[in-house]
Image (cartoon, rainbow, N blue to C red):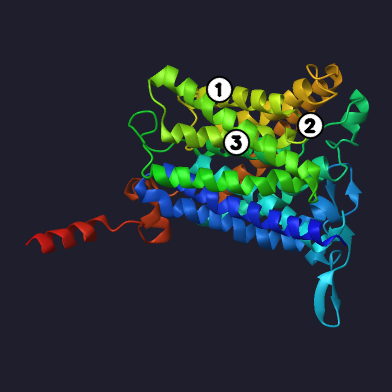
Amino acid sequence: MDTGNAAWMLTSASLVFLMTPGVAFFYGGMVRAKAILNMLMLSAASLAVTGIVWTFWGWSIAYAGSDIGGIFGDPATGLLLKDSMVADHGVFTAATTSGAYPGSIDVAFQTTFAMITVALISGALAERIKYSTWMIFVALWITFDYAPMAHMVWNGGLLSGDGAISQAIGATAHDFAGGTVVHINAAVAALVIVLIIGKRKGFGKQPIRPHNVPFVMLGAFLLWFGWFGFNAGSAFGANGTAGYAWVSTTAATSAAMLTWGFTERIRTGHYTALGAASGMVAGLVAITPAADVVSPLWAMVLGGIAGVLTCLACGLKFKLGYDDSLDVVGVHGVGGFTGTVLIGFFGEGTGLFAGGDWKQLAVQICIALIAILYSGVITAIIAFALEKTIGWRVTESQEVAGVDLSDQGESAYDFAGTASSILKEVK
């Protein structure tokens, strides 16, 4: 075992874990004050429910079980992590090593990826869904969507570099840290659920503004920090690839934040803090699949393109009439698709503009489209089943009063109490 690699991967797992609280603040600041606790709770449930499901069978389906049709692994081989953990004189330790660090650390790292992916979906559903339905959804979606997708892309399945799609086209599919598994997957799921559950009351008719933009900025900064574990950790060692992934992630994110801001300035006359935060996340999303294979120049170009496209895409919901509350589709869907496909242009030695040919572009488009199709179908089945049984939404009156009060029985801010205290002091 290489203790340096082990330390880096355990640190990376912890950084990726921090991304889910980052998402909670990022999303929480963008909703109205009457819904922030529910938003934070959806991220909390993403952590807790995924932690249980992954320990029972999620890890086995994604990484431990024998391959079944290139789509998923059997859930029994790694049930309760029995393939990964052993007791040595009564103390549990790793049964295996992978990449010169213990397999137990790999379980930890991959658990946090599953947690953040399902948490991303919650932003599209803000201010109107039941916490109980969300918890059930998380368990089902991690089991039938995320874990199989991770297997397909990262464990030698259908969409991997060794899979049937790559072999048919004659190029190696590339998704370094989750353009398909995480971002396209979550965004498509978000869109499907939004279409099933419908719009918030007043969507498109009245302004629905963020209640705490500093929270949004805090969340974006935490995400950028955590993303170093997400991308650099995907090198699976303390090595030069990890270092370069850190650099390319920062370059692309910086470019995306700036181009989002320039686009916003042209359209509205302002550089907004909300736009800066969203541009950061867009750049992080876009570089994720490509962080190890694009040069510094192309990393900045990729980030710059993503900043413009995602900024423009976020307005489509008003034209097309779907209520993606916090722009999961616009940022993660468009950003993830852009980063995945642009590997076909900018990938070193394989992309059209970087010494390669059309094959890399073809394979990248194929894996992105198949990821969209798989996520859409599986999520639709789960979401329809929940809608027809327990239902997704709180009542209209509960939504108007605030989902925090109806679902959590509490409020984030005691405005009435504060006002009363001030009046008493004045008197």
Quarter assignment of residue 410: bottom left
Residue type at tag 1? Val
- Along the line of sight, which residue is nearer the eye, 426 or 58? 426
Query: Dot 2: few (<14), some (14–19), or many (≥20) neighbours within 10 Å?
Result: many
Task: Kindly identify which residue carries mark 3.
Answer: 192
**Percent x, y for residue 202?**
36, 34
Q: Secondary structure at mark 1?
A: helix
Q: Quadrant of the N terminus?
A: bottom right
Task: Kindly identify which residue carries mark 2.
Answer: 293
Kindly tell me whether residue 213 is visible in this rendering: yes
Q: Residue at x 55, y 35 (%)?
A: 280
Q: Which mark is residue 67?
A: none
Task: Kindly identify which residue carries mark 1.
Answer: 308
Count every numbered label the image shows and give the total.
3
Quarter assignment of residue 381: top right
Residue type at tag 2? Val
- Along the line of sight, which residue is nearer the eye, 259 or 408? 259
Residue type at tag 3? Val
